[in-house]
Amino acid sequence: MSENFRSLTIILPICNPHKGWDTELSNSLQMISQSLVGIDFSFVLVNDGSNMNMNDEINHLRQIIPNIIYLSYEINKGKGYAIKYGMKQSFSNYYIYTDSDFPFGEKSVIEVYHRLTTNKYDLVMGVRDNHYYEILPFSRKILSKSVQLFNFFITGFKVKDTQAGLKGINNNVKEIFLSTKTDSFIFELEFIRKCLKNKIAFSFINLSAREGIKFSNFRLKILVKEVKNGLKLLLGL
């Protein structure tokens, strides 16, 4: 591989998406490809145990985005597991993961990539603005705000928002990411704590929710599970 060669893998977990998701995703991926000319892309879509048949949508995506890689397993294992599953099978200079509906828009992904390629940072994290929290469903808002305060404390008041769901890393950080054990919503907290412990160079970008995005609510069962996971991290279990 030449010194100037740059490859990028974008990892997108997905589970029971809404109707028309494939068209929206193909539009987003085309926009990113057109904005980052000359980059060798891999788009990795990880189906985290959806209970719906997506064969038609995947075939549609492959016609428009030939370099998309589709990975799937039958049982839902959590967002953290899905991203790690995709990253284990990816080999690039840089890796970015976000939700498949690009809640913060395509430009935020491009900004993360440009920040990574300065070679000043091994990790680039998105930080959500106040508007993001204003449009969240009530239970998700409570969980997100609670986790935010918890994260700020547990990271030694260095990282306030670990859960934005948009991050970019290079190969210096890949093994740290893959070594995390948490598979659920708060997997990023464990990841960031490990990065801080290893004194990884990091940077932040500001994130705003894209126009028209709608966020689903969390069920009580999920809320309870995440509280338990957070306590396990705090206690080092």
Image (cartoon, rainbow, N blue to C red):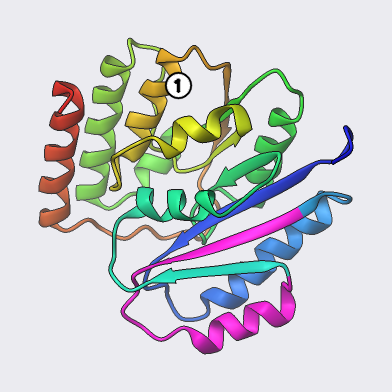
Residues shaded magenta: 41-66
Name the residue rendered at 22%, 40% in the picture: 143
Mark 1 residue element: helix
Residue 48 included in the magenta stretch of the image: yes
**Quarter location, residue 22:** bottom right
Q: Is residue 31 left or right of residue 70?
A: right
Residue 27: x %, y % from top left:
68, 68
**Crowd around label 1: few <14 · some 14–19 · many ≥20 (10 Å):** some
Residue toward you, 54 or 99: 54
Residue 200: x %, y % from top left:
53, 17
Task: From the image, tell me which residue sits under label 1.
Answer: 195
Residue 44 included in the magenta stretch of the image: yes
Residue type at mark 1? Cys
Name the residue rendered at 14%, 38% in the picture: 227
Residue toward you, 176 or 56: 176
Name the residue rendered at 44%, 39% in the picture: 178
Q: In which quarter of the image is the C terminus?
A: top left
